[in-house]
Image: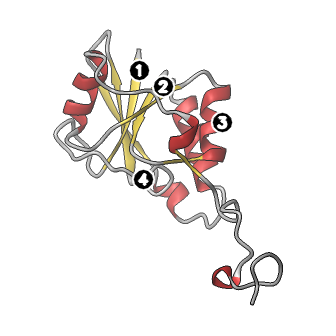
Amino acid sequence: MKIAVSTKGKSLDSQVEPRFGSSLGFILFDTESGNTDYLSNADQLGIARSKGIQTAQMIAEAGATALVIGQLGSNAAQVLKRRGIKIYSSAGGTVREAIQALEQRKLKEFGEDEIQPGPGKMGGRGMGGRGRGRGAS
């Protein structure tokens, strides 16, 4: 299995980055060989829109079969799920600790209630909730 973990650094001892599309990169750990690769997310950081989708595609193309993350948007989650990648939530710690927790089956698989809505999907009407329509005073 190849596990991708969002990270603030480039090693197994780096801290897990809770954000997905805004993560600096990912450690890709192969459980069979023990090898690690660093996947830079720098190309996606400059993108104003769809960075989560582009990041999800990068993870899938790298061969990941599982992802450990803190937060994830709905569009990125759809891309990952369509590619057969299982998504697990992590409360933090190091990349090594997150991988060990997943291997020991201590991490919970992401549920629909944990997926963050994307921009414009919060159900609001703009203008800080004071736009025209329901509840306007």
Q: Which residue is mark 2?
A: 64
| Local SS, label 1 | strand
> Taking 88 as reference, is 121 left or right?
right
Q: Position of residue 27 (x, y in %)?
A: 34, 36
Q: In this rendered view, identify the residue nearer to me: 5 or 75.
A: 75
Task: Return the disc, 2 or 3, that comes first in the chain's sequence.
Answer: 2
- Residue at the image position 46 percent from the left and 57 percent from the top: 22
Q: Which residue is mark 4?
A: 19
Tag 3 and tag 1, C-beta contact below 8 Å: no
Tag 1 and tag 2, C-beta contact below 8 Å: yes
Amino acid tagged 4: Arg
| Local SS, label 4 | loop
> Taking 72 as reference, is 120 left or right?
right
Q: Which mark is residue 45?
A: none
- Residue 137 in the image: above or below residue 109: below
Q: Position of residue 3 (x, y in %)?
A: 39, 25
Q: Which residue is mark 1?
A: 2
- Residue 79 in the image: above or below residue 40: above
Task: Return the disc, 1 or 2, that comes first in the chain's sequence.
Answer: 1
Amino acid tagged 3: Val
Estimate the spatial distance between the alpha carbons at disc 2 and disc 3, rounded to whole Å: 13 Å
The residue carrying pointer 3 sits among few (fewer than 14), some (14 to 19) or many (20 or more) residues within 10 Å by Cα, namely some
Estimate the spatial distance between the alpha carbons at disc 4 and disc 2, rounded to whole Å: 17 Å
